Image (cartoon, rainbow, N blue to C red):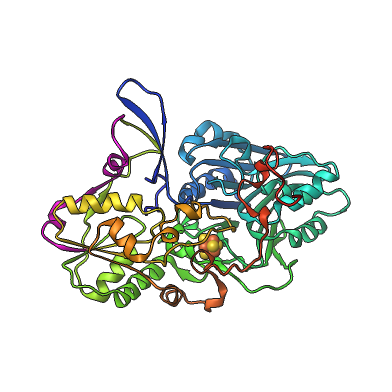
Amino acid sequence: MDGQTPVNSGDTILNSSHPVGWELSIVSPDIKEHCGLFGIYRHPAAARLAYLGLFALQHRGEESAGIVASDGQAMTKHIGMGLVEDVFGEEELARLKGHAAIGHTRYSTTGSSLLKNAQPLQVEYSRGGIAIAHNGNLINALLLRDELEARGSIFQTTIDSEVILHLLADPQFAHFEEALTDTLPKLRGAFSLVILREDEVIGVRDPNGFRPLWIGSLGEATVLCSETCALDILGAKPVREVEPGEVVIVNRDGLRSIRPFPKATPSHCIFEHVYFARPDSAIFGDSVHQVRQRLGRRLAREHPVDADVVIPVPDSGNSAALGYSLESGIPFEFGMMRNHYVGRTFIQPRQQTREFQARVKFNPVSAALKGKRVVVVDDSIVRGTTCKTRLKSIRESGAREIHMRVSCPPIMHPCFYGIDFPTKSELIACTHSLEEIRTFLEVDSLGFISLEGLLSAVSGPRESYCTACYSGKYPLPFGPEASKYILERKFSGEAHPIKR
Ligand code: SF4
């Protein structure tokens, strides 16, 4: 699966009409990234730095992007659908004035991909202006929204994050910090947040710490961001991760920390290490590249094979393939080249299939494959159809044997904490045995790393990671209201999932 750049190939092709014989295709990845967060306080070019930070976090969300800036008195906002470079130009950035800003790149985790659902969300209320950007998924959003609507609240979006804004705006609290400490413990699920007030930026991480959030410094400025790659692009120094259950308040007085949540055992999303985060980032106390390399080494020990060459599925398989090669002694090669210039849409001959799409995106390097016994390393297999197409092209390039190795266990369960997997019936590991998957992929052998192997690659205690999509053991219980589209279903005429 390719997850490290904003333009992913995948299985979904939505066709719209185009001149005869050709059609416009929209390409969706198998697993959709969730969101990237950025915040900065005390820098005269806050919005421009937010733009750069979002650019580095593009891999976490490619559907929409937005920035809200504040000069201490008033807020300005620009959001749009598409990639960061498409949403912002010089004109938009020039309008975003002030020394504080927050930004967001989004792939929809709750609510459809619509402009009204793009973040940051910003409102004016009795205490002034407030903007919020959210990474994760609230599993009790519907319950909270029902309660708020019963008290007269009016919502503009179908995303869970708007519930947080309404709770924070409750007029019963004289001070914002009271509203914050009352609201946050009511939220259940995964939420890393950056919040902007006129002269304050706030970072929040839920008590389970599902999603990452970093603190960095750039001269006098304080930066908050999902991954360290967003600090690197600015030349900012990583200070530390916001701890699970911690709230950091950054204003003229400096940085202050409060802990409004009851203590909980962390459950960091291990899939961030497998697939989502950039390998040049560090999250949850580990370098992503090093974790992936350890996964590759472990994979080589769990599933050894006699072969001539190890190749990655670029780019997210690179570090694990390198690890497999180092451990096994089998030479590493780049056996597939990726075209980085394929956008989210492209025009293709109408009669062509997803095989054509795969060829546009990835081209095998025949000279590295011909006559060879090839180990192909990928980070995960979801539906299996994209993987099958790529393997076929490797075979057609002359590979004598193909041995597929996967650096995470089979994905068998949905995620309710912010990752958008296909339904169970579409997950190949739910519907096929290992041998059936091998036959479907038409490979000579197939090996997935074990759950034990996955957990051996991270440095924290194993109980501090969420592995629910592999193990089915969910760290937070959830009800029927936990679905991504639940707030849309509520208004679509479908039965209310709670009031049946
Ligand atoms: S279920 Fe999987 S993807 Fe979701 S938070 Fe847990 S480990 Fe991450």
Q: Is residue 125 above or below residue 57?
A: above
The question of residue 213 being in magenta is answered with no
Q: Which of the pair 429/387 is nearer the observer? A: 429
Of the 4 image quadrants, the one containing the N terminus is: bottom left
Q: Quadrant of residue 331?
A: bottom left
Q: Is residue 134 visible?
A: yes
Q: Residue at x 50, y 57 (%)?
A: 231
Q: Residue at x 17, y 50 (%)?
A: 396
Q: Residue at x 53, y 43 (%)?
A: 48
Q: Is residue 169 visible?
A: no
Q: Is residue 460 above or below residue 173?
A: below
The question of residue 368 being in magenta is answered with yes
Farthest residue to the top: give it: 19
Q: Quadrant of residue 203?
A: bottom right
Side (left or right) of 64 relative to 372:
right
Which residues lie in the magenta part? 350-374
Q: Is residue 310 above or below residue 48?
A: below
Side (left or right) of 370 relative to 161:
left
Q: Residue at x 41, y 70 (%)?
A: 291
Q: Which of the pair 473/214 is nearer the observer? A: 473
Q: x and y percent of residue 184 in the render?
A: 74, 59
Q: x and y percent of residue 362 in the render?
A: 27, 47
Q: x and y percent of residue 216 in the render?
A: 56, 61
Q: x and y percent of residue 191 in the render?
A: 64, 58
